[in-house]
Image (spheres, rainbow, N blue to C red):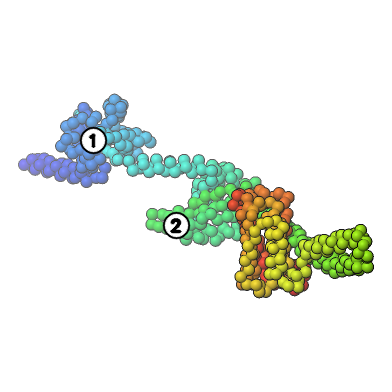
């Protein structure tokens, strides 16, 4: 009776053990598949169902081949046939060693797996249990890491990482090229080997910022190569964080900007040289303008002197000659026809000479400009121009009291005079409009003609010296002048001159 009870107890114990083992197999988060000697599936746990997308009812009793890609089935059967059943260090032998195997889902899709196999023998029969896991995520992560590693290695920028203590953890090929240390020489060394006494000043601040989790972007500094030379670099430092958010180190990207810095220094030098040259040109131009202003003063003064001498001395002499000729004629006998004709011709010649002297004197410096002012002088000038050339001139001066005299009046008169000379010589116009008006503290003078105009290259010809002189007259008084012209559409000159402008070099 005792023997029977013991046998029943053993049976119950075995049943309990089997139930417990079955529960473990069902609960374990690894796919577990058992097959017999014919490789027919006899165990297919829930995790295997999830991994292979196949229910246990469809898998049990079927061949294991359905979950192995066709290309690997022969090798797999041979592997099981030669399997000696001895476990590895962890109680099971890895089926692929360091390799990733491939499984086949019920839907026909292949996926990577990591598998181990255990062989057992019960009642003279062999049973094989495969424990496997889907390593798709691991393979994808590994591929991504390899991809990132390839990017780092192929980068032309030095990319390295260091831990919190400054120990270099990674070092790419570009870092070896830029800094001169091989990967073997650099990894495990402290990052301070790249800092000279000069360059180390920025290290503490940058390191503290990075360790606080603050990125450092495009910071320009200097670093030391293996041979001791210093190079200019641009560095971007990013914190490396643990899963819990704590900073465990930093990664840095270095770009060698030594050549760029050299080019920038050369560019700055060229810019400075250019600025100095421009300053010298401005100074030379200012001196030329001062010289031009001085020459204008001298020329105007000389013209005034000559005009006065012509008007006063030569005019008086001619008047005296005319009076003498008239006296001689009055003393002659009316019967002396020949002498009378000669004295009459002398008086006519003297009158013509007096007119020429007056005209020359007025062209040099109209006496009325000083005596009567700008407006009457412009009226006289335009009237004389129309009479001489036949070109109609419309003079528009709304306010005859412009309040301008001295150098400003002279400049406006000379600009109008030169403009009319250009119209007569080059434009082919038959009408000219002249407008002179006061605008605030300036006098604006516009001269328009309906002639053939000119293109920009024409201003570079010799005849444009007149235009240049007009500009200079305006500039030396602190004014400005603009010329606009289109071929066959006439020309406009606009001069803006301060009403109380004084030529540089002359007191007010």
Image height of 354 relative to 111, above or below: below
Residue drawn at x 49%, y 51% is: 251
Instruction: Return the residue at label 1.
Output: 107
Q: Is residue 402 rendered to the left or right of residue 368?
A: left
**Residue 269 appearing in the image:** no
Q: Is residue 170 rendered to the left or right of residue 422?
A: left
User: Does the residue at mark 2 contact the one at mark 1 (Cβ under 8 Å)?
Assistant: no
Image height of 247 relative to 406, above or below: above
Image height of 141 relative to 212, above or below: above
Specify the label residue 507 is tagged with: none
Label 2 vs 1, first from the N-terminus: 1
Residue 120 percent location from the top left of the image: 24, 34
**Residue 333 appearing in the image:** yes
Q: Is residue 188 rendered to the left or right of residue 280?
A: left
When asked about the image quadrant of residue 58, the answer is top left
Instruction: Return the residue at label 2.
Output: 247
Q: Is residue 480 rendered to the left or right of residue 302?
A: left
Residue 299 percent location from the top left of the image: 80, 63
Residue 291 percent location from the top left of the image: 78, 61
Compute the Cα span from label 2 to label 1.
Answer: 44 Å
Judge by depth and name the residue closer to the eye, 180 or 371.
Answer: 371
Residue drawn at x 73%, y 67% is: 410
Residue 15 percent location from the top left of the image: 14, 42
When asked about the image quadrant of residue 79, the answer is top left
Q: Which element type, helix, strand or loop, lies under badge 2?
A: strand
Q: Which element type, helix, strand or loop, lies under badge 1?
A: loop
Pointer 1 local density, CA inside 10 Å: few below 14, some 14–19, many at least 20: few
Judge by depth and name the residue closer to the eye, 183 or 450.
Answer: 450
Q: How many marks?
A: 2
Judge by depth and name the residue closer to the eye, 143 or 405.
Answer: 405
Residue drawn at x 71%, y 66% is: 380
Quadrant occupied by the N terminus: top left
């Amino acid at each position: 009776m005792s023997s029977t009870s013991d046998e029943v107890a053993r049976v119950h114990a075995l049943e309990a053990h089997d139930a417990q083992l079955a529960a473990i197999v069902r609960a374990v988060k690894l796919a577990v598949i058992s097959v017999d000697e014919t490789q027919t599936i006899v165990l297919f746990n829930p995790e295997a169902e999830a991994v292979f997308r196949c229910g246990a009812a469809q898998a049990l009793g079927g061949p294991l081949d359905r979950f192995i890609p066709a290309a690997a089935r022969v090798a797999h059967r041979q592997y099981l046939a030669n399997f000696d059943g001895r476990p590895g260090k962890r109680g099971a032998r890895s089926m692929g060693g360091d390799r990733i195997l491939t499984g086949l889902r019920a839907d026909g899709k292949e996926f990577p797996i990591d598998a181990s196999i255990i062989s057992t023998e019960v009642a003279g029969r062999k049973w094989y249990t495969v424990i496997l896991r889907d390593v798709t995520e691991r393979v994808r992560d590994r591929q991504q890491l390899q991809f990132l590693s390839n990017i780092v290695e192929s980068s032309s920028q030095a990319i390295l990482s260091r831990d919190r203590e400054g120990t270099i953890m990674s070092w790419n090929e570009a870092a070896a090229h830029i800094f001169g240390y091989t990967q073997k020489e650099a990894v495990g060394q402290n990052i301070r080997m790249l800092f000279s006494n000069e360059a180390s000043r920025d290290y503490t601040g940058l390191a503290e910022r990075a360790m606080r989790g603050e990125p450092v972007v495009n910071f320009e500094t200097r670093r030391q190569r293996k041979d001791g030379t210093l190079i200019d670099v641009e560095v971007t430092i990013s914190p490396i964080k643990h899963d819990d958010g704590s900073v465990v180190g930093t990664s840095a990207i270095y770009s060698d900007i030594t050549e760029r810095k050299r080019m920038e220094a050369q560019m700055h030098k060229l810019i400075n040289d250019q600025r100095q040259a421009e300053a010298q040109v401005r100074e030379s131009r200012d001196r030329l303008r001062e010289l031009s202003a001085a020459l204008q003063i001298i020329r105007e003064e000389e013209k005034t002197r000559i005009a006065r001498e012509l008007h006063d001395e030569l005019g008086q002499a001619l008047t005296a000659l005319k009076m003498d000729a008239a006296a001689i004629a009055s003393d002659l006998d009316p019967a002396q026809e020949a002498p009378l004709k000669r004295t009459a011709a002398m008086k006519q010649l003297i009158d013509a000479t007096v007119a020429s002297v007056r005209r020359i004197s007025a062209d040099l410096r109209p006496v009325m400009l000083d005596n009567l002012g700008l407006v009457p002088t412009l009226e006289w000038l335009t009237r004389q121009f129309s009479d001489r050339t036949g070109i109609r001139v419309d003079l528009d001066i709304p306010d005859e009291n412009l309040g301008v005299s001295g150098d400003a009046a002279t400049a406006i008169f000379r600009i109008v005079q030169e403009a009319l000379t250009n119209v007569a010589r080059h434009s082919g116009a038959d009408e000219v409009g002249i407008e002179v008006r006061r605008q605030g503290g300036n006098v604006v003078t516009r001269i328009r003609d309906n002639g053939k105009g000119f293109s920009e290259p024409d201003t570079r010809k010799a005849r444009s010296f007149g235009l240049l002189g007009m500009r200079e007259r305006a500039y030396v008084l602190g004014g400005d002048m603009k010329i606009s012209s289109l071929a066959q559409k006439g020309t406009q000159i606009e001069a803006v001159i301060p009403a109380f402008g004084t030529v540089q070099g002359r007191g007010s």
